[in-house]
Image: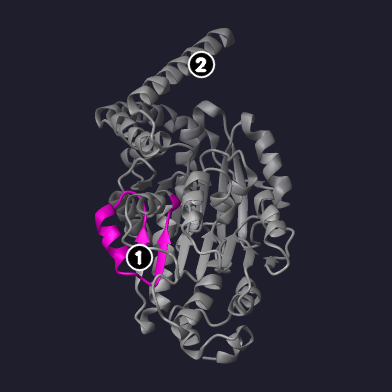
Amino acid sequence: MDEKSFSGVELSPWLVRQCATIGVRSPTAIQAHCIPQILAGRDCIGAAKTGSGKTLAFALPILQKLSEDPYGIFALVLTPTRELAFQIADQFAVIGKVVNLRHCVVVGGMDMVAQGKELARKPHIVVATPGRLADHLESCNTFNFTKLRFLVLDEADRLLGGSFDEQIKTIFQNLPKKRQNLFFSATITDTLEKLKCVTGSEVFFYEAPTEVATVEQLEQNYVLCPKDVKDAYLVETIRTYRGQNKGGNILIFTNTCKNCQVLSMTLNEVGFENVALHAMMKQQQRLAALAKFKSNTIKILLATDVASRGLDIPTVELVINHNIPKIPKEYIHRVGRTARAGRNGRAISLVTPYDIKLLQTIEQHINTKLTEFKLDDSEVGKIFTQISVTKSEAYIKLDEQDFYERKMINKRKKWMMEGLDPDEEEEKFLKTIKRSKKTKKNKKQKDQ
């Protein structure tokens, strides 16, 4: 191996050798720019396209500094989704194996007592989602961050976008003022721009110099379809693609947990074996589904946007957008699950007449025109009735599985954690649903 390829980033030889074991023999642009600055002790804001090696850009310098002065808890990595937390922890574990790295993953859906015990043992690296870590900080005193050296916010735009404000506030109140802050994201937003101003002159800011927000190796297509026939077009898209490509894995994104579950059941019924990944599933089920997909045991994964951030699954060759994201950056994150690290990939978006403006906004944002993915409309017509009936049956089965009861249990837990009365909040929630249904019914009657 040519170790000089890493000479410019001042990494220790043992780290270079560890990188080689996972096939990383030279730094990516974001790694080459950020690693020396982080090693020099500067705060860092890094933005580059998904698949550009952001995780190693912060993991490598943290591990080098840790090896020079090992103690726990040395670094805290915050991330918006549970799956991404496990993936980041895996990368730390592989690279840090030779220095006997101890790490801990703190996310919802797992045993809180077991996590508390792990934190009490002072692991070197803590990778966490904000909600569960804030719960630990508020409910126990068996650990602290007083000697924390590094704070990392991965997918920082989402963490600082408003959804996690209360939890982030709780966490920051428990962190030492003297620490090194590292913020990484695939997309630059107003939030990160403001952060750049607030952090002052000592912060190092790197943004990948490119006018195209998606990689050149990604072929981007659309399928124009009527709204009511979208699911039949989805099936025909998969069939057509499979006729051209027998092997590659397919990742299908949809907008809600309910849609994700119903579509998964429907596709399984019509012969496309798949697994689902969404927030209504237990954490062990989510990890099991991801493991089956990553290991190629099952080649189709249906997911909500919990899978759009940071997940690195090299075998994904096709991303299908069952719905068009309302925000262009979410489209970028979704399609970034394929064509990673120089590999080729394709993204196909199902577009109804109602989505044309959203599509045009995305095209302007990524500076790329999507081309049509040709389907045989007559084949769609042949399967339309079968798909509609199968989907209706899936809805009935979903009701029988107490899907909505589980959803309400999760909501009640959330309200309790926020200090609200769950009975009062449930009553308000049901009234809102009732009003929404009434509004939709009235609108439908007017349209008719």
User: Is any part of residue 382 visible from this angle?
Assistant: yes
Badge number at residue 104: 1
User: Is any part of residue 247 visible from this angle?
Assistant: no
Question: Circle 2 sits in a helix, a strand or a loop, which is it?
Answer: helix
The colour style of the image is: one colour
Question: Does the magenta-highlighted stretch encompass residue 113?
Answer: yes
Report the side of 380 relative to 103 (left or right).
right
> Cα distance, mark 2 to mark 1?
46 Å
Give the mark nearest the N terminus, 2 or 1: 1
Q: What's under tag 1, amino acid-wise?
A: Cys
Q: Position of residue 178 (x, y in %)?
A: 56, 68
Q: Position of residue 40 (x, y in %)?
A: 62, 80
Nearer-the-camera pick, 394 or 21: 21
**Residue pictured at 63% horizontal, 29% vertical:** 354
Question: Does the magenta-highlighted stretch encompass residue 76?
Answer: no
Please tell me in which quadrant of the rendered image residue 407 appears.
Answer: top left
How many C-alpha atoms fall within 10 Å of the one at disc 2: few (<14), some, or many (≥20)?
A: few
Q: Is residue 378 above or below residue 148?
A: above
Q: Is residue 252 above or below residue 448?
A: below
Question: Circle 1 sits in a helix, a strand or a loop, which is it?
Answer: strand
**Residue pictured at 57% horizontal, 50% vertical:** 160
Q: Position of residue 314 (x, y in %)?
A: 47, 64
Kindly identify which residue carries mark 2.
440
Q: What are the residue bounds of the magenta stretch? A: 104-130
Q: What's under tag 2, amino acid-wise?
A: Lys
- Which label lies toward us, 2 or 1? 1
Q: Position of residue 387 (x, y in %)?
A: 40, 31
Badge number at residue 138: none
* Quarter of the image with the C terminus in it: top right
